[in-house]
Image: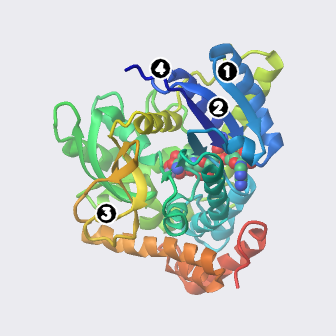
Amino acid sequence: MTDNRKFSVVIAGGGSTFTPGFVLDLIKSQDMFPLRQLKFYDNDAERQKKIADAVKIIIKERAPQIKFEATTDPKEAFSDVDFVMGSIRVGKYHMRSLDEKIPLKYGVNGQETTGPGGMAYGLRSIPAILQIIDWMEKYSPNAWMINYSNTIAIVAEACRRLRPHAKVINICDMPIDIMNRMAKICGLDSFHDLDFTYYGLNHFGWWKSVTNKKTGENLMPKLKGYVNENGYWVGGDYDKDTEPSWEATFKKAADCYKLEPETLPNTYMQYYYYPKYEVENADPKHTRTDEILEHRQKIVFGECKRIVEAGTAKDNIWDISGLHSEYIVDICHAIAYNTHEKFLANCPNNGAISNMDPDSIVEVPCLYGADGIQPMATGRAGRFQRGLMMEQQTCEKLVVDAFVEHSYNKMWQAFALNKTVPDALVAKQILDDMMVVNKPYWPDLK
Ligand code: NAD
Ligand code: G6P
Ligand code: MN
């Protein structure tokens, strides 16, 4: 029987800097994941329109069969869809900048998804993501939400507790980015050529094994030798457009590897292993957000404006495919066609890491199919890793407690327990500053 299905997708966070790349990858993948409809939803009409006006032209020129619309109306956005892509940033770059800069004022890491900044961002995201899930369930009860709005670990814990039956899968592209680098190091094309065992929490994990998918060759010795010297920095053509802070991150993986050489680390371990180094090397007046405003956001919105003014997207500069979006298309395809391919997801542990609690949110390999995800067993976590994970996941759970109970003390405990924060008083000072600026987004913590 031929399968003539065509899918309808809504991108929640249509104004995201990643949206145009994602649209191009969707268009490129029409034989693999055909669309009948694409919608954008955002609560900032003006920001979304700048992207949508350019995308309208791209679709008209390259895939006119896809019906396209951009809206700020939830009913219109979430009706008649098969997939919801969650790409929102509550508080936008203005709040990300504060997440990064407030902790640095107190000598603590300032980072989008880790430490106090990551917890502040997570608390902002929870109500918005729950709201989107509710709209999806109301208007398109059979749809799946693939969410990558951060802070994923906290959002996933909130979903586990507050929407346990929702068809939502929380994903991250960092391990995929690193695995593409691993493939390069081993002379292979992409992460598709690798098999792997990875376990941990989001932005907090380790590879136990990496093999050549075709031959079964164990690639760990080669990778360890390389990472020990260079981290995941592969240079050359591959890294030519990588911004300075990412270059530093990929290189720092060498030091992360040295601390625990049985496994290969996620790059985000740098913030937990070497917070002193991170703070000393940060500029509290110019953080990652400033780099994005000067680079990615400028390029994306500049190019959209150029396309709209020219009235055509011929020779636009995004014809290079984005890793982030390629991965999301792969995942939609696996669910739509019930392929049972293996990708990572953040989900309740339920035995996947044998010495972690069943209700821990973990990031582990899962089989993706029409019924969603099935976590795979990864064995025992090492003593070192388990110790780190117990602390970190407790912070993530405390943030959700703070949300549910409107509890100031739970949020303070979350900050105080975190490995990136040296002292409960410092935790309180950061929290008190954050309370003020997060007033429009956080529950009223008492
Ligand atoms: P961005 O600020 O460019 O775009 C986010 C958009 O979300 C904005 O247009 C904003 O108006 C909109 N928005 C904010 N709150 C909303 C709400 N309540 N409802 C609807 N729309 C809302 O951000 P970006 O840098 O492109 O990143 C988008 C998201 O993707 C972020 O959450 C980022 O952390 C995440 N991200 C995750 C991964 C991953 O590995 N999981 C990878 C890359 C990006
Ligand atoms: C990786 C992570 C994401 C994070 C992003 C930040 O892709 O997996 O979770 O949001 O990096 O990148 P940026 O370029 O916005 O600093
Ligand atoms: Mn991520």
Q: Nearer the viewer, mark 3 or mark 1?
A: 1
N-terminal of the two: label 1 or label 2?
Answer: 2
Question: Where, by quadrant of the figure, is residue 130 drawn?
Answer: bottom right
Q: Is residue 69 left or right of residue 27?
A: right
N-term mark: 3 or 2: 2
Front residue of 4 and 106 = 4
Q: Can you give x and y, in whole percent of width and height, for residue 105 in the image?
A: 67, 70
Q: How far is mark 4 from mark 1, CA to CA?
A: 16 Å
- Pointer 3: what residue? 259
Residue contact at pointers 1 and 2, CB within 8 angstroms: yes
Q: Earlier in the sequence, mark 4 or mark 1?
A: 4
Number of the label disc, if any, that sits on residue 31: 4
To which residue does mark 2 refer?
38
How crowded pointer 1 is (Cα within 10 Å; few <14, some 14-19, many 20+) is rated as some
Q: Mark 2 and mark 3 in contact (Cβ < 8 Å)?
A: no
Kind of residue at badge 2: Leu
Q: Is residue 306 visible?
A: yes
